[in-house]
Image (spheres, rainbow, N blue to C red):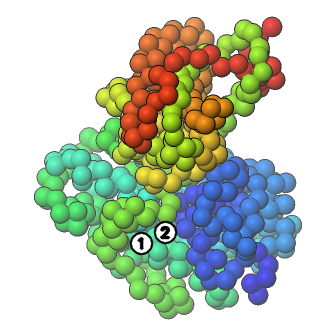
């Protein structure tokens, strides 16, 4: 019966974003749940006639109950990857308890959970893997039967595991590696994971069962490094295992050379310290499919990257944090603590012509002017634990709300008029960057660039004024370079302007001007 919708939690995540279109192709109705609907409303499948978008949070029981109401089954694809102060353990526990309660209240037939492949008797298990096992136990102890698919490393374009592998091999011709490069793993391709997930929905005999899912290869991480080098047509990397590199040091090193932050790299590297090999393969006879080898999965992922067809990325997951003062209008007010730097220029061009370079900004395109300064700021950010510029962007031309864009996150897109970015770099305050295209009343368009900053403390104010001359230089140069990139003349040279902010601008209460 495909008339009742299937709830997919974690719809903005790497797996959820690929599962939903596969469910639609199989004829199912889908209810996609996310904390911020803007992050999924721009997905290609969001407008499908059989998709419902619902706002919900697994840590908010009432919202989860509403999301599950009327559904037939649910996919539980949520787990914390925050490696800070063990908060993830309690968060995962509460979320699993809420899911079990919401499923019971909604009368769901089943829950399908994507867990982690590990043995509880293994004393070297990381805290994150132990938490994944606890989540499975909580869900399976509830009244609604839960199928637990225990998965090892997932290989696919855009996955965090694949990105770490890619950057290690492509950036380092020689590397000193920790002892965990000798641990055994049984990686599985993302397309095989999706097939198993949908198969568990269709095969009643899988209800309430626990299965190990893996690919056909059992190998070490060192083997994976060698295979990647061969598939990427690179020389074999010199790998020297050393005993002194702990998972924490490994995660810090990965953070410096790859776009994956320490908070995500740490649980992944900790998980590699123990073997992840399937202990049974019952599911292969229930849901038969061609399992891709590691070589085939890596080759396919590289092809997807070359063809710029990466459907989802590890960067997609996470909450979109909107500053309280993000929506400031155009009426005048005096005073306040919001710092701003704005430049504008008029161009003899159409909205679409100007929007094209604006929507492609960042990533491989760069920032049109002062790219060295942007890269320097990115390096400084990574050195203090920030994301830096290396994340790039998921697609070189397509952009949507919630997308990562270098060390920014897209807060709002209104093509072809407005692009609003919120900073995810390390700063002593909150920062936003806005591009706005307006008519000038004379048949031309005006492109505005506006940087806004809410400082935290005295250091935040010093930080803003120290960078202010660079803002002026870069914004002036960017406007001229954007005009050159589309071959359209400037009607007026870039000039400074001071925005007029709305009297109802939503500032934090303690910082509202008198």
24 up-or-down from 141: above or below: below
Observer able to see residue 510: no
- Percent position of residue 486, x then y: 42, 42
Tag of residue 188: 1
Of the numbered discs 1 and 2, the one sitting upstream in the chain is 2
Q: Nearer the viewer, mark 1 or mark 2?
A: 1
Where in the figure is residue 476, as x and y percent of width and height? 44, 22
Taking the spot 80% from the left edge, 66% from the top edge, the residue there is 68
- Which x, y percent locates residue 452? 60, 23
Left or right placement of residue 305 versus residue 498 in this view: left
Q: Secondary structure at mark 2?
A: strand
Instruction: Please identify the residue farthest to the front as the structure is shown.
Output: 442
Residue indicated by mark 2: 151
Measuring from the top left, give residue 416's x and y in whole percent: 60, 46
Instruction: Answer whether labels 1 and 2 touch (C-beta < 8 Å).
Output: yes
Q: Quadrant of residue 204?
A: bottom right
Q: Residue at position x 55%, y 32% from top? A: 447
Which quadrant would residue 215 be assigned to in this image?
bottom left
> Does residue 509 lie above or below 97 as drawn?
above
Q: Residue at x 54, y 64 (%)?
A: 15
Judged from the image, the secondary structure of the residue bearing numbered disc 1 is strand
Pick the front one: 145 or 474: 474
Asked if residue 30 shows in the view, the reply is yes
């Amino acid at each position: 019966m495909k008339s009742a919708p299937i709830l997919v939690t974690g719809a903005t995540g790497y797996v959820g974003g690929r599962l939903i279109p596969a469910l639609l192709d199989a004829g199912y109705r889908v209810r996609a749940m996310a904390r911020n609907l803007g992050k999924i409303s721009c997905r290609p499948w969001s407008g499908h006639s059989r998709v419902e978008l619902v706002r919900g949070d697994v840590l908010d029981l009432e919202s989860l109950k509403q999301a599950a109401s009327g559904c037939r089954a649910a996919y539980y694809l949520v787990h914390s990857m925050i490696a800070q102060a063990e908060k993830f353990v309690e968060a995962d526990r509460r979320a699993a308890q809420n899911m079990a309660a919401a499923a019971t209240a909604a009368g769901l037939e089943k829950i399908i959970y994507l867990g982690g492949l590990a043995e509880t008797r293994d004393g070297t298990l990381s805290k994150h893997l132990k938490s994944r096992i606890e989540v499975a136990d909580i869900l399976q102890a509830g009244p609604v039967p839960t199928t637990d698919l225990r998965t090892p490393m997932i290989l696919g374009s855009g996955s965090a595991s694949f990105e770490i592998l890619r950057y290690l091999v492509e950036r380092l011709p020689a590397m000193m590696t920790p002892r965990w490069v000798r641990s055994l793993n049984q990686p599985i391709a993302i397309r095989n994971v999706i097939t198993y997930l949908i198969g568990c929905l269709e095969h009643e005999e899988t209800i309430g069962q626990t299965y190990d899912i893996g690919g056909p290869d059992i190998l070490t991480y060192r083997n994976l490094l060698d295979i990647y080098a061969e598939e990427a047509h690179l020389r074999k990397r010199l790998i020297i295992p050393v005993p002194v590199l702990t998972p924490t040091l490994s995660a810090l090193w990965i953070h410096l050379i790859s776009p994956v932050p320490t908070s995500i790299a740490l649980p992944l590297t900790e998980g590699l310290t123990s073997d992840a090999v399937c202990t049974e393969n019952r599911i292969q006879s229930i849901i038969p499919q061609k399992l891709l080898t590691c070589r085939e999965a890596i080759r396919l992922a590289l092809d997807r990257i070359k063809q710029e067809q990466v459907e989802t990325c590890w960067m997609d997951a996470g909450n979109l944090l909107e500053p309280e003062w993000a929506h400031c209008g155009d009426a005048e007010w005096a005073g306040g603590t919001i710092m701003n730097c704005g430049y504008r220029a008029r161009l003899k061009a159409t909205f679409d012509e100007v929007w094209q370079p604006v929507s492609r900004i960042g990533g491989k395109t760069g920032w049109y002017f002062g790219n060295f300064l942007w890269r320097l700021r990115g390096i400084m950010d990574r050195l203090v634990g920030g994301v830096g510029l290396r994340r790039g962007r998921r697609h070189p031309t397509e952009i949507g709300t919630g997308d990562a864009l270098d060390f920014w996150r897209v807060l709002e897109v209104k093509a072809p008029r407005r692009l609003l970015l919120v900073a995810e770099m390390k700063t002593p305050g909150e920062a936003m960057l806005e591009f706005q295209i307006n008519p000038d009343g004379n048949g031309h368009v005006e492109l505005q660039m506006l940087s806004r900053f809410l400082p935290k403390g005295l250091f935040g104010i010093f930080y803003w004024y120290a960078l202010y001359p660079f803002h002026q230089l870069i914004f002036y140069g960017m406007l001229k370079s954007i005009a050159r990139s589309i071959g359209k003349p400037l009607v007026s040279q870039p000039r400074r302007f001071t925005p007029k902010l709305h009297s109802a601008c939503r500032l934090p209460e303690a910082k509202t001007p008198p």
